Image (tube, rainbow, N blue to C red):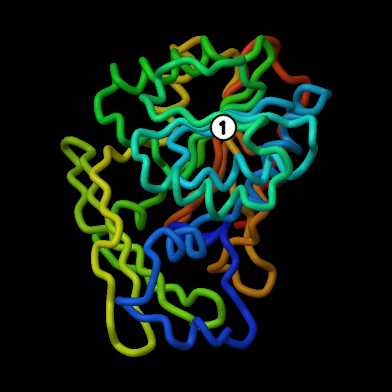
Amino acid sequence: MSSTTRNKKHKKGKGSLKKKDRRLNRKSADRLDLYQRSVNSPETDVDFVTEQFEALRGRSARHFREDFCGTAAMAAEFLKRDIKNTAEGFDLDPEPVTWGKNRNFAKVEDWEERMTFHLTDVRNPADKRPDLTCAQNFSYWYFKERAELLGYFKSVYADLAEDGLFVVDLYGGPEAMSEMEEEREIDGGAFTYVWDQKQYNPGSGEYNTAIHFRFNDGSEWKNAFEYNWRFWHLTELRDVMFEAGFTEVRPYFEGTDEDDEEEGNGIFDYDEVGENCEAWLGYLIALKGPKSSETAPKKKKKKK
């Protein structure tokens, strides 16, 4: 398992800089464009959730719900996959939703007939019961009290189709709770993404983080995005999911790159145990209805 940190599951950009990227700076940059290029990987994410749905449920997911959807990059990608697919997105902030409509859905066929946006609380029901509901980029950490998180998970459970899946990503390991910055070059060095773990309070679980962007001309967009969350641990989340009514909760951990053991390989495998490392990325898939017949592979014992 990798000792990767935040968002390392998304590949670094390669190749020569485009002309527009050479001029990129604090004044010319688009905050949401920078975020989407640095953090989102809708093709990879949709591959994972749809493949897991088919493996666990033996059919294709047709209706997708993206909670805390922002620019709704995942929903747009899901709609691109098949004209039969439909989706709904929930978010309170109209700014990223409007941006996403203009940027992510421009080449999606009949998207206005197949996509519904809800500028409302994610605890509200969808128009149609989703096969798949996703809450990505640790967005559900917005719920700081256990009762709030349980209420959200219960609303997801009630809203899902009878054999629906709920998928969240998560982050853990000792390094995840350290106050530190991590830099990563994006799109071949067009700009630098900075993940800043500002503060973690072990007594309350309060977790303050931010995203900065640094440019080749020396300018910087500091605190382009700021988050005040509670750090939720995997075992806590599983307990709350079971309490919400889910029949099975499956953890998936990222593997290690063959050429660099400090890097993740972007491949997430079902593993009930996991491995202890400095930092890791993973998913939890919670099942409504019948349990899956798929079992986790047996782990090989490490040589001493």
Q: Nearer the viewer, residue 280 or 47?
A: 47
Considering depth in this image, is 208 or 261 the residue closer to the camera? 208
> Residue 234's image quarter?
top left
Q: Give SS at disc 1.
A: strand
29 shown above or below 240: below
Q: Name above or below for residue 287 compared with residue 77.
A: above
Residue at horizontal 59 percent and vertical 74 percent from the top: 13
Q: Tell me: 153 left or right of 195.
A: right
Residue 118 as seen in the image, left or right of residue 131: left
- Which x, y percent locates residue 221? 28, 71
Q: How many marks?
A: 1
Counting from the top left corner in percent of width and height, residue 174 is at 35, 53
Residue 291, quarter of the rendered image: top right
Q: Left of 24 or right of it: where is 162?
A: right
Tell me the crowding category of disc 1: few under 14, some 14 to 19, or many 20 or more residues within 10 angstroms, Cα based.
some
Locate residue 193 relative to residue 20 in the image: left or right: left
- The residue indicated by pointer 1 is 167
* Residue pictured at 40% horizontal, 66% vertical: 30
Q: Residue 250, can we see it?
A: no
Residue 223 versus residue 72 in the image, above or below: below
Estimate the x, y position of residue 114 in percent, counting from the top left: 67, 31
Q: What residue appears at the point 64 percent right and 13 percent down from the top-left corner?
A: 161
**Hey, what amino acid is under mark 1?**
Val
Pick the quarter of the image with the C terminus. bottom right
Q: Write the residue at 66% across / 9% down.
A: 162
Most foreground residue, 285 or 154: 154
Report whether residue 138 is seen: yes
Figure check: 246 above or below 278: above
Residue that lies at the very extreme toward the right in this rendered image: 58
Residue 1: x and y in percent read: 59, 55
